Image (spheres, grey):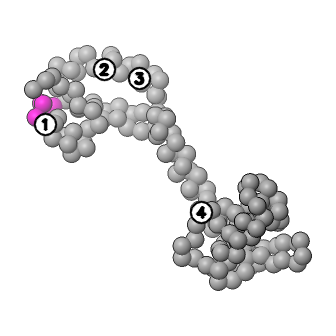
Amino acid sequence: MKNTTFRQLRVFSEVAKQLSFARAAENLHLTPPAVTMQVKELEGRVGVPLFERNGKQVSLTTAGEYILVHARKILSTLKDAEDVVARLQRLEVGQLTIGMVSTAKYFVPPLLAQFQREHEGIEIKLLVSNREQLVKMLHGNEVDIAIMGRP
C-alpha cells in the first residue's frame, strides 16, 4: 500500500460504511466520479479489488474487509493526533517551562495564577537560575520563556 493517502482511506471507509458510492460522495461532499477515482487508486495500490460491484449493489471483498479494519484504526489514530494538536493550539494541554532569576520567584507565581485558572491543562514548570544560564537554556530550548533583568 505504498503512497496510500489519508483521503483514499477516508473515502474507502465511507463507501464501506454506506455500501454506496453515491451516498458516500454525498456525505463527503464529493462527486461520485471523485469517490470512484479514490477507491480505484487505493485498489491499484493494494493490488486487489476492495469492493464487489453488481450494478448499484456494493459489498466488501475479503481483502476490503481486512483493509477496512486497518483503515479505521489509522483514521482513528489520525483523528486523535489532530485533536491533540488542536488542543495544544488552543492552549488546552501542554507544558510551559519558565526560567527566571531568583528575584523573579517572588512575583512571577502570583502573576501565573490567572493563567493557570484559564488554562488548567497547561502544566507550568518553573526553573530558577542565573541570567547566563537562562540565556543558554533559552537558546537550547530547555525553557519556553526566560524572565530576567536587563544585561
Q: Nearer the viewer, mark 1 or mark 4?
A: 4
Determine which residue is flagged by label 4: 6
The numbered mark at residue 115 is 3
Three-letter code for the amino acid on which mark 2 is drawn: Pro
58 lies left or right of 120? right
The numbered mark, 1 or 4, whose residue comes first in the sequence reads: 4
Q: Identify the residue at horizontal 30%, vertical 20% (top origin).
A: 109
* Residue 132 among magenta residues: yes
Mark pair 1, 2: CA separation: 20 Å
Three-letter code for the amino acid on which mark 4 is drawn: Phe
Q: Residue furthest bottom?
A: 47
Q: Identify the residue at horizontal 25%, vertical 16% (top origin).
A: 107
* Magenta segment: 129-133
Mark pair 2, 3: CA separation: 10 Å
Mark pair 4, 3: CA separation: 37 Å
The numbered mark at residue 133 is 1
Determine which residue is flagged by label 2: 109
Q: Position of residue 26 (x, y in %)?
A: 79, 56
Task: Assess whether mark 3 and mark 4 are in contact (beta carbons under 8 angstroms).
Answer: no
